[in-house]
Image (cartoon, rainbow, N blue to C red):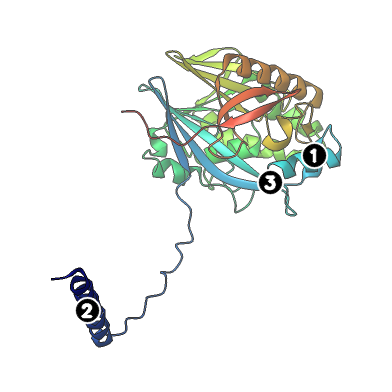
Amino acid sequence: MTQHSMKKARHSLLAAMIAGTTALVSFLPHTAFADAPAKVASQVPGYYRMNLGDVEVTALYDGYVMLDPKILNGASAKDIQGLLARTFAASTSGMQTAVNAYLVNTGKNLILVDAGAAKCFGPTLGVIGDNIRAAGYKPEQVDTVLLTHLHGDHVCGIATADGKAAFPNATVHVSKDEAAFWLNKETAAKAPKEMQAFFKVAEDAVAPYKAAGKLKEFKSGDTLLPGIVSVPSPGHTPGHAGYLVTSGQEQLLVWGDIVHNHAVQFARPAVAIDFDTDKKQAIATRRKLFADVAKKKLWVAGAHLPFPGLGHVRAEGKGYAWVPVEYAPLAK
């Protein structure tokens, strides 16, 4: 066969194949593609797990609250809005502020640091119990509750709506200075009228544990359990305390309310918030802890940092920057 004949044969074969395919398709039924399924419209359960040496830490999401940027003070409104915009956190509805708690499993103790707001602050908060269960635990397995302070978004979650202990097998720990302020009836009676509700919230939350002899007070700096030391951090409240968890060479500081807004307060540590009992002291505490955790490269867990609120702090310019944890599977 000549080259011309071969080329002509190939063209004929190709034409036949195309014709056959076209004929076959014409006999196939016309199939309509199905619409996408309905949207699921729900988020994943609010927990995130990490290993700290031999300790398992589970961050728990309680929800969020919208705060007005005007409650931040110590910088101009323009500066604050610029910092919020830089992290795309500026919003006409306010600053979305997470509320987090932390479950620490040492192998001997199951410890909850703070317990969320329950129903004290509206419908966008109060799911700590659900997320403990979603994370594979049960509230009755918690044997120790460590409170950073007695504000409602940290303490309301330790009690049920009918005034019972939400963690029936747990002993609750709070610093002496914190208890002396919020659980003192004379101090409460002398407080401004707008503050009265804060004292009642604290008293009601600890009541079932106090009645059962399971409310314990400690001095800041005390070792509370093996590998867990309280860290004095007053200012936001009189007896505010963090907790330093150590396992092997790894350390995590659960620092409570040192930061309420990551976009502003890391860059401007001198920015306080209206909720601070002593703004000057709160700023001094924040500066000290920022410098310490940045220098030592400690893990940090923050109650109002974007969930899961775990990460590191690094020095940046005249201020600091937040470096959040990266999602990773647990090492076996």
Q: Which residue is nearer to you in this view: 24 or 309? A: 24
Q: Is residue 194 visible?
A: no
> Nearer the N terminus, badge 1 or badge 2?
2
Asked if residue 76 lies left or right of residue 250, the reply is right
Mark 2 vs 3, N-terminal side: 2
Q: Is residue 107 left or right of residue 320?
A: left
Q: CA distance from mark 1 to mark 2?
A: 75 Å
Amino acid type for the residue under numbered disc 2: Ser
| 3 or 1: tag closer to the N-terminus | 1
Q: Which residue in the rendered view is the most extreme toward the front?
A: 2
Q: Position of residue 297 (x, y in %)?
A: 56, 18
Residue 196: x %, y % from top left:
75, 39
141 or 159, nearer to the observer: 141
Query: Would you name the residue on which mark 2 appears?
Result: 12
The quadrant of the image that shows the C terminus is: top left
> Which quarter of the figure has residue 1?
bottom left
Q: Which residue is mark 3?
A: 88
The residue sitting at 37% across, 75% down in the picture is 34
Q: What amino acid does circle 3 point to? A: Phe
State the residue position of label 1.
80
**Which residue corresponds to the image point at 77% horizontal and 38% vertical from the top-left?**
195
Disc nearest the viewer among 3 and 1? 3
